[in-house]
Image (tube, rainbow, N blue to C red):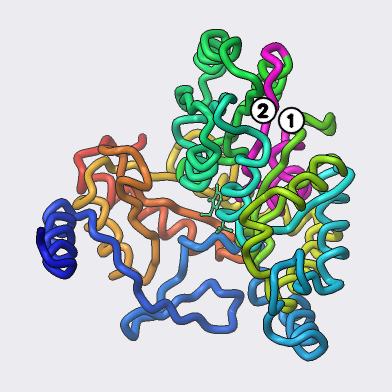
Amino acid sequence: MQSLTEFAEAKLAEMDDASLRRRVVDSDRDGEGGLWITRGGRRLLSFSCNDYLNLAHDPRVKAAAVAATERYGVGAAASRLVTGNHPLYTALEQKLAALKGTEAACVFGSGYLANAGIIPTFVGPKDLVVVDELAHACIWAGAKLSGATLRIFRHNDVDHAAQVLATYRPRHGRALLVTDGVFSMDGDLAPLPALASLCEQHDTWLMTDDAHGIGVLAQGRGSSFAFGDKPLVPLQMGTLSKAVGGYGGYLCASQAVIDLVKTRARTLIYSTGLPPATVAGAIASLDIIQGDPDLCALPVAKARRFTALLNLPAAESPIVPIVLGGAEVTLQAQRLLEDEGLLVTAIRPPTVPAGTARLRVTFTARTPNAEIERLADLIRDRVLPLNGVERPE
Ligand code: PMP
């Protein structure tokens, strides 16, 4: 067998050859709402962050985090089930439940941990879990950890999901269908009303991952409410790391469901509670989200400004993909935009399917309109021609 180091070197060389190696790069930021990132001495305007409402740098949120550190310390010091459940958790869970219109909520260490803990709480080896093919990596992680039979349906294809359920549902005890509410690399929404009625028809529970919906869709309430006020989704999972500006995951659901999660989800039980500052920051952010629907509407409005400039279908969320196809051309496009002072990260397989490498463009409440126009011009005039992709008329 190769030595560990030889193995790693060979793998890295393989990835370099295919333009698929990923790197962690220092990204410093200044006080201007986190919009500007400094890399290698260059100051770049970021079209790549998920802090859609710029709350990570909001003075009210920072003040709440500082005060909580002073009062409760830097770390939770234990699992929430031992002594890590500092009193701020209750306030945060009540606010999340109120925003999502559920009886209760449970906060996890991160969105990834939430999905890895929630799915195995509800389905196991005799059960079925059905997942959209473009679902986020941590949904797959949770589905695999559950030991349930995993079946995939084509992206947002309700008819295919119906076929999958018709074939496999009768062979299993319990069944769960999981989808992103907003797809993280495509920015489109799941057809939740149709999926909800399909699930009802096939005696299947529906779960959404609303990581990119909370704070920015339906006055901040998220993707489940983008189709009206009727509650559609009994398991609404999400993260506090995007529009909420901090860190942590959550599930909003009925009281009994949350009570079960708190006694069974292994990623909650066997992992330390969030730092008090993080929980306090999230509470302050949610107060801002609930009190300022105009702010919540801005990221999607900015994304729509961009899609209109490029004659693309109107953005449904703050995320707009510019699919270029090859990994190398996408990296080239990223470098070209960096030379113009704009940071738009190349997303390559395996994060997205092979042949669909893309620039993932995201918009925040404070992204300047003039820069949106400049980016659209650069994409039309210099990025799309790199690939021979047709220029939008
Ligand atoms: N779900 C989706 C759809 C996401 O985009 C992300 C973040 N990349 C996560 C879950 C994971 O959330 P967190 O960063 O809080 O672990």
| Quarter of the figure that contains the C terminus | top left
Tell me where residue 147 appears, x and y as whole percent.
51, 35
Q: Which residues are magenta?
A: 201-227
Residue displayed at 86% across by 60% down: 291
**Element class at badge 1:** loop
Q: Residue under label 1, please give it.
A: 227
Do the numbered discs 1 and 2 sit on residues whose CB atoms are within 8 Å? Answer: yes
**Element class at badge 2:** helix
State the CA–CA distance, disc 1 to disc 2.
8 Å
* Figure check: 62 above or below 147: below
Amino acid type at mark 2: Leu
Q: Which badge, 1 or 2, comes first in the chain's sequence?
A: 2
Foreground: 125 or 383? 125
Foreground: 374 or 265? 265
Residue 43 falls left or right of residue 191: left
Discs 1/2, front: 2
* Numbered label tally: 2
Q: Residue under label 2, please give it.
A: 192
Q: Which mark is residue 90?
A: none
Foreground: 139 or 242? 139
Residue 259 falls left or right of residue 135: right
Q: Is residue 221 magenta?
A: yes
Residue displayed at 75% across by 66% down: 80
* Figure check: 13 above or below 301: below
Confirm whether residue 3 shows in the render: yes
Tell me where residue 344 appears, x and y as whole percent.
39, 60
Q: Is residue 224 magenta?
A: yes
